[in-house]
Amino acid sequence: MHMLLDHQIQDLLDHLHDEEDELLKRFDFTLEGRRLSKAESLQFIQFMKEQLNKKVGYN
């Protein structure tokens, strides 16, 4: 299970530079088994992009 999860996380990180609509098509975002709405998914994507930019030093 962890190997699959790690692969999925890496795949998301590798594609965070993609447009949000492409990410929504590529990934299903869930929280505790509930699929996130489009708005919630977009908030999560934006949060992840912001965090990655902070880590890389773009902000």
Image: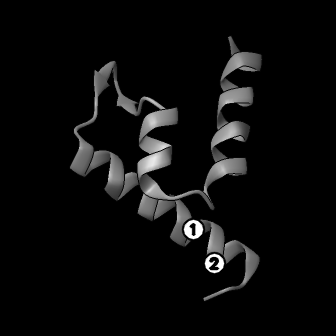
Residue at 67 percent of width and 86 percent of height: 58
Going by the numbered disc 2, the residue's amino acid type is Lys
6 or 17, which is in the foreground? 17
Identify the image quadrant of residue 12: top right
Q: Position of residue 40 (x, y in %)?
A: 26, 48
Identify the image quadrant of residue 11: top right
Q: Position of residue 37 (x, y in %)?
A: 22, 38
Q: Quadrant of the N terminus?
A: top right
Question: Which structural element holds mark 1?
Answer: helix
Q: Which mark is residue 51?
A: 1
Residue pointed to by mark 2:
54
Q: Position of residue 32 (x, y in %)?
A: 34, 24
Q: In the figure, 49 relative to 22: above or below?
A: below
Question: Which structural element holds mark 2?
Answer: helix
Residue at 49 percent of width and 46 percent of height: 22
Q: Quadrant of the C terminus?
A: bottom right
Direction from residue 46 to residue 31 in the image, left or right? left
Q: Which mark is residue 28?
A: none
